[in-house]
Amino acid sequence: MKNLQIVIIEDESATARNLEYILKEINPEIHMVKTLQNIAEAVDWFALNESAYDLIFSDIRLSDGLSFEIFRRVNIRKPVIFVTAYHDYAIEAFRNNGIDYILKPFDKKEVQRTLFKYDLLIASVSNNEHAETGILLQKLTNTAKKYKQSFLIHYRGRLIPVEAAKINWFRTANEMVYAHVTNGMQYIVEFTLEQLENDLDPALFFRANRQFIINKNAVDAVEYFFNGRLLVKIHPLPPEQVVVSKAKAMHFRKWLDQ
């Protein structure tokens, strides 16, 4: 744990200061690289600082959404310890490089325990520093994350298998989620957009806004819209416009350009 480089993602300044104080009390040689307060700031910083740190302590609920969004937008290959006041997100935490999950209000003993777990994991991998991150994350997740490849959909008394790649877009309306397929059919799926966003391959699908997740192959064109937003033309034409916010516009353009 000597000279451990740590990044904190936390929108409550008092909590971030308390965590930093405890970490320094446990080991004065720990270096606090950066404290990030929201998703937008974190995405920008991690995009430019791929290897400037060893470990992340992250809250889950931030002022501009759930911190899992950071890990969907940026390819982060370092382990994460999630610090939160909520039990609800344990499973998703471990899907996002999580090695541990501690609840607020935390104390020195709890932080020591989680750092000890990190030390054990580091000690169990090769001494080859170039391989260390990849091997560590393999040990943490056991297997690489597998994205959803197909859906078994109930339709008129039958079960119909539909390949994820053949779904043009998902749309939520009237508390239902609809999947529009390349053959022109539209089905109701028993998932929320939040669940789909986590389970679908981010190289192929993008959460455009609160109503839509779209398939890259369904995008025909992108037009500049009001106030820095983007208007996305997709096929087949959905019942309402697909608009990407100014905050997501840069990431959407990068996603299309991959």
Image (spheres, rainbow, N blue to C red):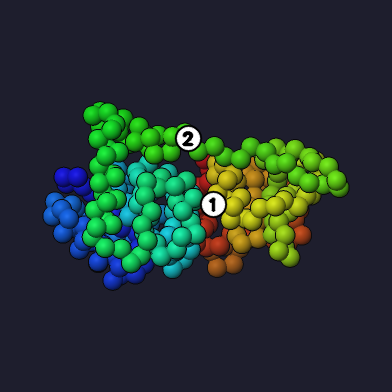
Q: Viewed as shown, does residue 24 lie left or right of 135?
A: left
Q: What distance separates the C-alpha of mark 2 from that of mark 1?
A: 25 Å
Q: Which mark identifies residue 203?
A: none
Q: Residue at x 44, y 68 (%)?
A: 63
**Residue designated by label 2:** 144
The reply to whether residue 38 is in sight is no
Q: Residue at x 75, y 44 (%)?
A: 153
Secondary structure of the residue carrying numbered label 1: helix
The amino acid at mark 1 is: Phe
Q: Residue at x 48, y 56 (%)?
A: 89
**Residue designated by label 1:** 252
The amino acid at mark 2 is: Ala
Q: Viewed as shown, does residue 239 lie left or right of 227?
A: right
Is residue 148 or residue 36 the one in the foreground?
148
Residue 1 lies, in percent from the top left, at 19, 45
In the image, residue 108 sits, relative to residue 113, either above or below, namely below
Q: Viewed as shown, does residue 88 lie left or right of 214?
A: left
In the image, residue 58 sits, relative to residue 174, either above or below, namely above
